[in-house]
Amino acid sequence: MTTEGRPATTEGRPATAEGRPATARRTPGLVGVAWALLALNTLGSAGAKTVVPIPRSLIQMLTMGALVAAFGLALAVNRPVRVRASAFLFLLTLLLVPSVIASVHLEVGFGALFRCARLALFVATLWLLTRWWDGGLTFVRHHVRTYCAVLGLVAAGLVVAPGTAMPEYYGGRLVGALWPLTPPQIGQYAAVVTGLTVLLLLGRRTTASGAAVVIVPSLVLLAMTHTRTATLGLLIGLVLAIGSLFLTSAAARRLFAWAVLCAVVAAVVFGSALRAWFLRGQSRENFSNLTGRAKVWDSLLASPRTAGETVFGTGLGDKSFDGLPIDNSWLAVFQEQGLLGVALVAALLVVLGGVALLRPPSLPRACAIFLISYCALSSYTEVGLGDASAYLLHLALAASLLVAPAAPVRPAAAGVPARPVPRWARR
C-alpha cells in the first residue's frame, strides 16, 4: 500500500476551475456505488412503523451487508491499493482508540464491540476512497443522488400510505413509511440535498430546471418533518457558504440580496404562521428545555463515573442514557468515548474549518463550508459525530472537497534530455 500526497497525474496539464487536474483519471462508477452503500449503512434500523413491518434483524443485516459490500468494492477498485493522506481520517482513526478501550469492558454489552468493528470498517472504506479525493465535485453528485433516492423512497411512502407516513405518535410529522426513518433523519437529508443543489446551481454546475426538480420536493418534505434543527442548519449553512463566495461571485451577491429581501417579506407577511410552525404546538416551558432534552443532559452530567469512564467513556452504545435518547453529539461522545473522544471530535471540526478558511474561494470550498457548519450546528440536538453515521459521511465529503489540488508538472522540453534522478532519491 502506498500513500499519495496528491492525485496521480502524468500529463502535467493545468487544473480545471474546480481545482482538479484536466487530465485526472475519471472516477470509476463503482466508487459512487460504494459511497451509496456507505449512506445505506447509516440509515439505521430503528424508527417509525412501516406499512409492511420489517424485522429489525433484517434491516441490520441489510445495513451491515451494505457496509461490507462498500468495503469490498472500494478494495476491489483500488488496485493496487493507494490512499491519500488525510488529517480528518487520521483523527477519525484515532477515535477508535477510546472506543475500543472503553468497549472491551462490556459495560454496555457485546454490542459495543460490534459497533467498534462497524466504525473501523466504515473508516477503512473511507481511506480506500481517498484515492479519488481530488477537490472536485464528483462526490457531491454521488451524495446528492444517493440522498435523493432516499427522499424518493420517503415520498413514495407518503403517496402509498399517508396515514402511516404522518402518524399521530410523532405529532403528524413526516416519517418513513417504507423504511423506518424518523423526522429528524428525513429533515437532515432534505436540508443537505437542498443546500448542495443550491450551491451547484449557483456555480452553474446544474440547470435551473434540474435544480428545481430536486430543491422543491426536498423543501416540501423538510417542511412536513417540522424539523427545526435541519431548517436552521440549512439557512445558516447557506448563508456562510454563499458568504464565502460573496467577493468573487456576482451570482452569489445577487442570490444573497434576493434571499434577504424574501426573508424580510416572509417575516412580515407570514410571521405568525412561521412562529406556529417553529413552535410545533409546544408550550414555552417545553420549548425552553428543548422538548425534555435538557433534563436528560443534566442527569447525564450529574451521573457519577470513574476516572477511566471520564477519560475513555463507557463504550459505544445506542446513544441513550437511562433509556432516554441523549440527542446531543457532544454529550453522547462524552458518555461513550470520554473526554478523549470529545477532544478528537472537536479537533475534527477545527481542522476542517481551519482548512476551509485557508482555501481560496471556490465552489468546492463553499460546499465544504455548508457541510461543516450544518454538522456543527446539528451536533447540539442530534447525535452521530462519534460513530458511523450520516454526519460523519457529510464531514468526509467536506474533507474530500478541501483536498489541495495537484500542482501541474511541466513536461520536459522537446529534444532536451531529462535530468537523471539520483539513486538515493529513486529509493
Image (cartoon, grey):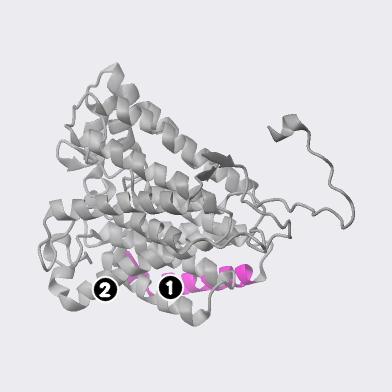
Q: Which corner quadrant of the image does residue 223 belong to?
A: bottom left
Horizontally, residue 136 falls left or right of residue 90, namely right
- Magenta segment main secondary structure: helix
Residue picked out by circle 1: 266
- Residue at point 49% right, 61% down? 28
Depicted 41 relative to depicted 294: above or below: below
Disc 1 marks a residue whose amino acid type is Ala
Query: How far from the left and from the top, in percent, is residue 271?
Result: 37, 70
In the image, residue 426 lies in the stretch drawn in magenta = no
The residue closer to the viewer here, 108 or 133, is 133
Question: What kind of element bears circle 2?
Answer: helix
Residue picked out by circle 2: 155
Q: Residues within 10 Å of mark 2 (few under 14, many from 20)?
A: many
The label on residue 312 is none
Disc 2 marks a residue whose amino acid type is Ala
Query: How far from the left and from the top, in percent, is residue 220?
Result: 33, 73
Q: Which corner quadrant of the image does residue 137 belong to?
A: bottom right
Query: How far from the left and from the top, in percent, is residue 159?
Result: 21, 78
Question: What kind of element bears circle 1?
Answer: helix
Query: How far from the left and from the top, in percent, is residue 297?
Result: 26, 37
State the CA–CA distance, disc 1 to disc 2: 27 Å
The residue closer to the viewer here, 15 or 164, is 15
Q: Which residues are magenta?
A: 251-275
Residue at the farthest bottom position: 209
- Residue at point 23% right, 67% down? 174
Q: Residues within 10 Å of mark 1 (few under 14, many from 20)?
A: few
User: N-terminal of the two: label 1 or label 2?
Assistant: 2
- Residue at point 33% right, 25% down? 312
Horizontally, residue 163 falls left or right of residue 424, namely left
